[in-house]
Image (cartoon, rainbow, N blue to C red):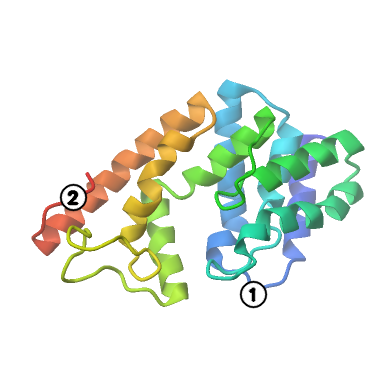
Amino acid sequence: MDLPSLTQALEAAFDRLPEDRDAGHGIHHARRVRDNAMRIADREGGDRLVLVAAAYLHDLVSPPKNSPDRKRASAMSAEAAEPVLRDLGFDEEKVAAVQHAIHAHSFSAGVEPTTVEAKILQDADRLEALGAIGVARTFYTAGLMGSDMFDADDPFAVRRPLNDNQFALDHFAAKLMKLPATMQTNAGRDLAEERLGVMHAFLGAIAEELGVHPAWR
């Protein structure tokens, strides 16, 4: 199967998923992860059929961020991907490759990626948490969880512990700004550093509007 045919089939498979998925893990997220993966693969190589399939199916099962099943989401998605991949004609080797990439992509799963495709998918997905889209996703998710935008008395957590379950802005220091150092590929790391610069600019702007020091720049 060539890439255009695979993409068309995966788009159709995605259309059959339940419609109650949050926008942070919908079809547009899958497409952006696909595009990120292709951009990284231009420099790093890898099997593009495996990468495209993994990009579309990596969030096949997507519990809410505060669900007790969240740490198992990538394992559940890898399992759910198997019948889809077999229907698409993937052989045993490619099914296993896609499943490993899906299982290893998650930050919370703690699974070490051992193939170039798994490393690329992990980087491609983490790029979604950075840059302007990362800012938008952070506050969108915080809204879904009922979190506050920031602590009005101490927005940059100078005098208190970070609490990104309560304050969206805390998530930048608690997790997002650490992501470039976790990138598995050189290409992913370069893209992450570019997007981190966008987030630094955002943090500087919000600090200026609040009249405080941007402690995390």
Residue in the image at 69% along x and 46% along y? 102
Dots 2, 1 in contact, CB < 8 A: no
Mark 1: few/some/many CA within 10 Å (<14, 14-19, 20+): few
Which of the 4 image quadrants contains residue 1? top right
* Secondary structure under the numbered disc 1 in the rendered image: loop
Image height of 91 relative to 17, above or below: above
Which of the 4 image quadrants contains residue 6? top right
Residue in the image at 71% along x and 58% along y? 60
Which of the 4 image quadrants contains residue 105? top right
In this rendering, position of residue 116 left or right of residue 64:
right
Q: Which mark is residue 20?
A: 1
Image height of 139 relative to 187, above or below: below
Residue 94 can be seen in this image:
yes
Residue in the image at 36% along x and 71% along y? 166
Q: Which residue is mark 2?
A: 215
Residue in the image at 35% along x and 45% along y? 177
* Secondary structure under the numbered disc 2 in the rendered image: loop
State the separation of the CA atoms marked 2 and 1: 38 Å
Q: Which mark is residue 141?
A: none
* Position of residue 129 measured from the top left corner of the image (x, y, whole percent): 45, 50
Mark 2 or mark 1, earlier in chain: 1
Image height of 35 relative to 185, above or below: below
Q: Residue furthest bottom?
A: 146
Residue toward you, 8 or 26: 26
Type of residue at label 1? Asp
Mark 2: few/some/many CA within 10 Å (<14, 14-19, 20+): few
Instruction: Work out which quarter of the rendered image holds the C terminus and state it.
Output: top left
* Position of residue 206 measured from the top left corner of the image (x, y, whole percent): 19, 58
